[in-house]
Amino acid sequence: METLHAIPRLRDTVRNWREQGESVALVPTMGNLHNGHLVLVGEAQKLATKVVVSIFINPMQFNDKSDFADYPRTLEDDRQKLDVNGVDVLFVPEQAALYPMAVPMAHLGLDSATRVEVPGLSDILCGEFRPGHFTGVTTIVAKLLNIIQPDIALFGEKDFQQLLLIMRMVHDLHLPVKIVGVPTVREADGLAMSSRNTYLSADERVRANKLYQILCHANEQITRNSHGTCDFRAIEHKSMALLDNEGLRPEYFSVRRASDLALAGPEDQDLVILAAVWLGKTRLIDNVRIG
């Protein structure tokens, strides 16, 4: 596996692959890799002949500076995992390369950087509680897609809202890349794998799977009833109370249309339940599709 830091070098590498008839898949990450990331790598290898994994802790998507400062940086361990799993290139760009205008205009910081925003989807659910987060996500993903120009880019469905935002951005900007969502990878007790799970204390880790259990319980309630008679708002309210009783502080628990994350109505069929909670100092998100 080759580790590249410079954008021109990466572009030369991809260009050489193209000349040899290779196809390219991208797996964007912020590092601190776990088995969920490696499943994305495995899926990428099924869909393309060359795989690029990027590691960049994107400051624009952190609305809390201390969260950015504390985010685990485990590059050497990540590099070994990717090498063992047959990744072709690890791309580790410097911040100055991805946000060049933030350097000469340092007094403005990232406020001076060009950004990409998806209105509507960016300010609901997680976007309501993390202002500016999704603008940071779509901006960095747009940059990586432009730099690497992969045929395929893969994202985990655990971040369902993020996946929809990226799909909308790619569609609206006519970017020539296929976005593939990969099902959530879970621990044995159902907890969705996440880089932030390392923040959990031993006691918190025991309780963390309650989020998935309550999502599944709500799913069962809705599935047992026809959508025309199911009271989604009552199920949301009850589920929030159950989370609170388990010591998880919910931000939201919401039944939405899977296509656009609008509030689900009686006539809607393709649904997803999304939730975000705090457990101690750790923020957890998860979702389940109805049915």
Image: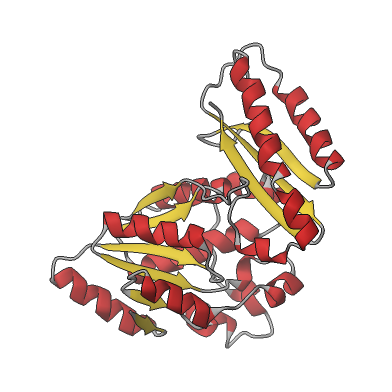
Locate the N terminus and report the quarter of the image it occupies. Answer: bottom left
Give the tally of numbered discs. 0
Q: In this view, does 65 lie to the left or right of 73?
A: right
In the image shown, does 190 or 226 lie closer to the viewer? 190
Choose top left, top right, bottom left or bottom right for residue 81: bottom left
Judge whether 272 appears above or below 201 on screen. Answer: above
In the image shown, does 257 or 48 lie closer to the viewer? 48
Image x and y of residue 80, in percent: 44, 78
Residue 100 visible in rendering: no
Colouring scheme applied when the structure was drawn:
secondary structure
In the orientation shown, which residue stands out farthest toward the left?
A: 20
Image x and y of residue 163, in percent: 50, 49
Q: In this view, does 105 lie to the left or right of 199?
A: left
At a point 41% along the width and 55% down the height, the residue shown is: 154
Choose top left, top right, bottom left or bottom right for residue 65: bottom right
Q: In this view, does 54 lie to the left or right of 101?
A: left
Image x and y of residue 128, in percent: 72, 49
Image x and y of residue 188, in percent: 58, 49
At a point 81% along the width and 47% down the height, the residue shown is: 248
Judge whether 52 appears above or below 228 on screen. Answer: below
At a point 59% along the width and 13% down the height, the residue shown is: 226
Residue 21 visible in rendering: yes
Judge whether 176 appears above or below 254 on screen. Answer: below
In the orientation shown, which residue stands out farthest toward the bottom?
A: 104
At a point 22% along the width and 74% down the height, the residue shown is: 15
